[in-house]
Image (cartoon, grey):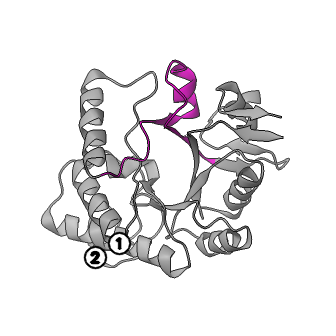
Amino acid sequence: MIYLKENVQVNADDFGLSPSVNRAIVHAFQSNLITSASIMANMPSFKEACTLIAEYNLNGRIGVHLNLVDGFPLTEGIRSMPRFCDEKGCFLGRKSRFFTLTSREKDAVEQELDAQIRKSIAAGISPVHLDSHHCYHRAWPICSIVIKLARKYGINSVRIERNCGPDIRPVHNIYNFLFNNRLRIFGLARSRFFGSVDDRFYDMDKPLADIEIMVHPDLDNDNHIIDAWVTEPSNGTFLEERLGNIGVIGFI
């Protein structure tokens, strides 16, 4: 039997992205590989994800994966913003971070993120945390909006910025400290440390207590649960093995 170590949060991002991701996340919950997941309200398999949340009694373990990157927005305002959307009104995909926004852009972003949270709540979800696709909420003006919405909807935790791993430059360490301290001041910081499985593997000296590990479950052709962020498949691609290698899960 698999068990998760105490005081470790393993969060599955991208719930609602696709049927295979949805099935993988449910299997990961059932296998005790994850503690929580984050749902994408504007993606094609959102309704299916909501059905699975109700069917498997996962409410109370679900947050909202705020999305300004992929798919079609829920609101009109942001579709006319060329920094976010193309001429068809679809999100542009992953771009550089937004460290400044115009007042119109701020209003449009707030309306869109608010709509994503409201859609999740209307579907019967009680969000317990907020994070974002490709960590776009790390941008200072977008974080201001996320903090405002977390307080508006009584959501008591927001993902901190990555502070584990091999390639964090000194200037980023300063920014990450300021960003994470900002969330702590508002009582919203979800953990003390945050990173991917690979980041945790690099920083094995970081204590397991109070750490959030981000994973992206999906299914391979043999229905094994893999971490979709691993670009070169290997034995370590299997999520169970990857989490076991960093000491997050144990066996009885």
Q: Nearer the viewer, mark 1 or mark 2?
A: 1
Q: Which residues are magenta?
A: 187-216
Q: Closest to the observer: 65 or 252?
A: 252
Percent x, y for residue 93? 42, 55
| Amino acid type at mark 2 | Gly
Residue found at the very far front of the displayed protein? 6
In the rendered image, which residue does mark 2 sit on?
77
Q: Closest to the observer: 192 or 41?
A: 192
Q: Closest to the observer: 177 or 72?
A: 177
Question: Is 241 above or below relative to 205?
Answer: below
The secondary structure type at the circle numbered 1 is helix
Percent x, y for residue 165? 46, 25
Residue 192 shown in magenta: yes
Percent x, y for residue 2? 79, 40
Q: Is residue 177 left or right of residue 210?
A: left
Residue located at (50% from left, 61% from top):
63
Residue located at (31% from left, 70% from top):
152
Residue found at the very far bottom of the displayed protein? 122
Residue located at (65% from left, 64% from top):
58
Q: Is residue 189 something one can see in this rendering?
A: yes
Residue 191 shown in magenta: yes
Residue located at (68% from left, 61% from top):
22
Question: Is 183 above or below relative to 209?
Answer: below
Question: Is 143 above or below relative to 45?
Answer: above
Identify the mark at residue 114; answer none if there is no mark: 1
Neighbour class for label 1 at 10 Å: few (<14), some, many (≥20)? many
Percent x, y for residue 204? 55, 20
